[in-house]
Image: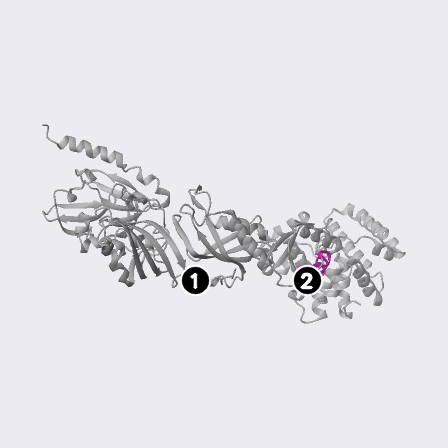
Amino acid sequence: MLPLKEKDKPVVQKLLSAGCCARCVLRFCCVSVQAAYRKPHQETLKELQAFIGNTENGKSQDPVAADSTEENNKSHDATVPEPADDPPSKRAKLELSGTEAPSEGDAAEQKLTEEPSVCVVCLGILQELCGTTQAVKIAEKVKAEKYEFETLVLSVSLPAQLCVREHSCWLHVKKELREKSMAVDKDDVVQVKEAFKWVLQGLVAKEIGGVAVVARSLFEISVGFTHKETDADCHFLATACADCFRPTKNKQSVFTRMAVVKALEKISDTKFLTHFACPPAKPTSSCSSQDVQCLHQCVFVAGRYNKYSRSLPQTPWVIDGERRMESSVEELIAESVLSSFRSEGFNFSSSGREDVDVRTLGTGRPFAMELLNPHRCNLSRAEMKLLQETINNSSDKIKVRDLQIVSREAMGKMKEGEEDKTKSYTALIWTLKPIQSDDIAFINDIKDLTLDQKTPLRVLHRRALAVRPRVVHSMKTRFLDSHHFYLEMRTQAGTYIKEFVHGDFGRTKPNLCELLNTDTDILELDVESVDVDWPPSIPE
Amino acid sequence: MDCLEQKDTEATAPSVIDRYYTRWYRADMKGNPCEDHCILQHSNRLCVITLAETHPILQDGRSIKSINYQISDGCSRLNNKVSGKSKRGGQFVTDFAPLCRITCTDETEYTIYSCIRGRLLEVNESILKTPSLLLKKPFTDGYIAVILPKFDESKTITENLLSREEFESIVSKRSVAESPPS
């Protein structure tokens, strides 16, 4: 049985004769029982017709329609010169009797078996576009993309003129609706979008098989509709509510759904009615569906990397649109990761970064990747281990360990420790003055040396100018020859090591030149450890 | 760290300047003979203004009496402040904007100019405390100022400047003219 009451009858009657489809009638009657929408719409239409036929005369809707048509004709005729008055009204009567004649007999039966015309409000969205055929089409597209997912959610984008038509229809039955219940407002009408999803979501899930519909699913299927024929429906709003439609660079049309809704809130009923038919005019075709888009939420992968090359940047190095250096750490890692997760793109981040000519040794530097629209997302421990091996076999310039899937929240831990954690380095130092082992031994005793480090000239073009205190916790020297020694350092993260060694025009103080009282320069630098305890290590 | 083959250390003394910077010059600044300026342009477009090795201040064992960044009653380069990544608030200087005046102990005074258009990021306050830096390390710790050219002018800004070769050829002609015919 339809969840409708006696009071709904005038509304149902008015909507059906205006050319509304069965599901739109349910919407305007504020029926929120999802099951009512899931029945085939032709069946619901039959029930609705029976419902209004029960009490009143079964053909009562026809005289109503005839009346209004006659009225229309008369008002039209009024503008026509006198002599023409008679013949048109006669013709109108003839036509009317022509259509009325069969309906006296078995027309009621015939009407129901006929393909119902396209709904004036939803433009077919809640009719054929909301049925099994459509569900099969969507399911096939999704299957072709070979995503792995356990749940899905459907999203739908509708042409903006649907709002205009909805508004017109609302004005058409507002009086009757308000009589039915004091509380009814436009917001109480069930939205086309909601009704569409109630019907189609389940059908699509059934066609795909083995998946559940969940409101906050990681996997989203988007379907969109357009309706060229009625695109112009919105246009009068541009002049009636000019301030709602400001052209923007990125939008193809100013008639966005948001703008149209805003304009409809502003416009007065009388103004609306002078510009737009009420009820809306009948369309000849239904909406056409656009491409089905699938989107799986991002997956995050983390690990630690070593970099063994002094000619490999961390990220692609591009100057004036031209590529410098042929590869990068992130690209070497991403290649295999993207193909394993069948992901469309990625964002790479890490706990700090090293210069192109610096190696990262030891247990490596923590990094994380956000994988965009992955078609696979649940790789097992074993598969992740295999992926790690694939990366490590693909290049001898880098090595990855502790590769694992992490949550978005866990990624924050990597950035947390960036400034207050420590890092260890080994630098190869050159001195201008010849040195002996004893000359540099005093450096081993220096503990927690605080540097005042002005933003290095090397990065001043992209960082704010500031003096930053940075602590060198400890240093150890290894004498090499009269002009060279190795300097091992443990420092606060964020210390610029190269500038500490050469002094950066005296902008890092104290610096190694001052300590040794001679010019010093850095020839090689290695990161020995990045002391961030994330991501957790994975035992071999 | 095992690939060390730096036998001839003295010959290949590394240089921070050569590694990151290109040297540009202005000779005879504002028509004053030998008042040459050097502009070190970093590969990131930032410029460091220094004296050129031929500048009179660096000749004849001169010593410095004072350095003054107060270039007029109303303007001191020491008041220059920049904030944020975009370096808001820095004084904008053009080719011939004075940066500071340097007085030597023999009372000769020289004005150092910015040489290029751009935003003044900082002046070197260390040379106020230790003027000898200017003489001992004129191209590094004894720099005068740091200027950031506009992004779209960073390539054209050096068009008015002399390359190292051009500058050296000017200097060599100078010494030919000066040296008395023997």
- Secondary structure under badge 1? loop
- Magenta: predominant secondary structure element? helix
Furthest residue toward bottom: A182
Magenta stretch bounds: A190-208
Q: Which mark is first along the chain, 2 or 1?
A: 2
Vertical placement of residue B181 versus A442, above or below: above
Left or right: where A232 falls relative to A40: left
Q: Residue at x 61, y 60 (%)?
A: A218
Q: According to the image, label 1 marks what residue?
A: A532
Picture quadrant of residue B130: bottom left
Q: Residues within 10 Å of mark 1 (few under 14, many from 20)?
A: many
Left or right: where A137 falls relative to B140: right
Query: Are marks 1 and 2 in one subunit?
Result: yes
In this view, the residue in front, A69 or A474, is A474
In magenta stretch: residue A532: no
Q: According to the image, label 2 marks what residue?
A: A212
Residue type, mark 1 in image: Val
Q: Whole-percent x and y of residue A1?
A: 80, 68
In this view, the residue in front, A104 or A302, is A302
Vertical placement of residue A309 versus A352, above or below: above
- Secondary structure under badge 2? strand
Q: CA distance from mark 1 to mark 2?
A: 40 Å
